[in-house]
Amino acid sequence: MKLKMNDKYNVLNFYSVPRKLIRNTNKHMFILLYLALTLFPFIWALSTSFKPQSEIFALPPTYVPKGFTFENYYRILIVGEFWRYALNSIFIASTSVLISLLVSLFVGYATSRYKFIGKEFIMFFMLGGMAIGRFANVIPLYFFSTRVGLFDTYFIIILSSSALVVPLLSWLMQGYFRSIPYELDEAAKIDGCKSWDIFWKILLPSMKPAIVAGAVIATVNAWNEFILAMTLTRSPHLRVLPVAINFFKTELGVQWGELTAASIFATLPIVIFVIPLQRYFIQGLTSGTLGSS
């Protein structure tokens, strides 16, 4: 008995469904496994932050706190000076973001819209500086700050955090500026706009995704700064959150309850800040990459 055309199509469809289902199931299982491995340390730290000291070291370990308590958060937020360190991180991060964004926007605009001698050398020199890494910059920055009187100040942390992220943001901004048609500049010049007006009134409003992407990168960079903040400051009142968290490791042992509570407290602002901007962040990165190619 011969199958009709529709019957053959239905048979092929019937056999293709299980294959698609298996393929999709494998993909979802891989994603779930990856998420589980990625989120487990955070979930474990969150669980530990709500445990009393006796339960933290209990064997076998408990994944869900039996003696649920806010004591660890009370110690860091009420008894300790963790709010001061949080305000230090907010001040340093916001100032560093503002400086790095302004500098990188000017660099990206100048290198994408104007021709001048040494432009390519300057951009590749900045890119080469990124390859050195912050650990190699610690000693030069230490001697520089002590010589010019900036050691143990807010300014040296802000300056170093901004300087280390400006090259990356400059390349990002240059790529996004190149993706904006140059005809916009020419039309604005015909209407009597000067270069300054073109930058602020025509191009900058179109740079929203790139600015958001740059702000996220600069914020994460400044907020998580540890090695430079630890080396270039000594005063307790200048400590930022990563440095303050490090001091929960004492000679008598690690205060795991307070350390995990402080880590959760320091992580949440970045998570809350990044998630709503995720769409603009991806758009800014991809557009900047395509524009610079």
Image (cartoon, rainbow, N blue to C red):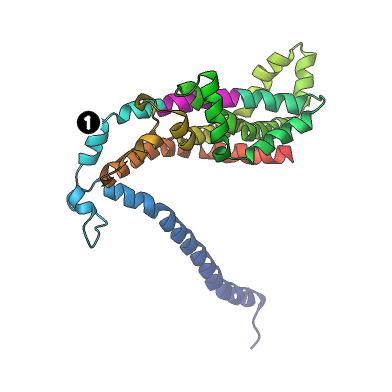
Whether residue 209 is visible to the viewer of this picture, yes or no, is no
Q: Residue 90, image x and y in percent?
A: 42, 27
| Residue 196 spot, x, y in % from top left | 70, 14
Q: Position of residue 263 (x, y in %)?
A: 35, 41
Give the camera-side residue of 152 and 186: 152
Q: What residue span does the magenta drawing correspond to?
A: 89-102
Q: Is residue 226 visible?
A: yes
Residue 89, located in which quarter of the rendered image?
A: top left
Quadrant of the snapshot with the C terminus = top right
Give the residue number, with chain letter if any, for mark 1. Answer: 79
Q: Position of residue 99 (x, y in %)?
A: 56, 23
Magenta span: predominant SS is: helix
Q: Nearer the viewer, residue 2 or 113?
A: 113
**Residue drawn at point x = 51 percent, y = 19 percent:** 149
Side of 114 relative to 140 (left or right):
right
Marker count (numbered):
1
Query: Could you classify mark 1 by the number of other residues whose Cα lies within 10 Å: few (under 14), some (14-19), or many (20 or more)?
Result: few
Q: Residue at x 29, y 28 (%)?
A: 81
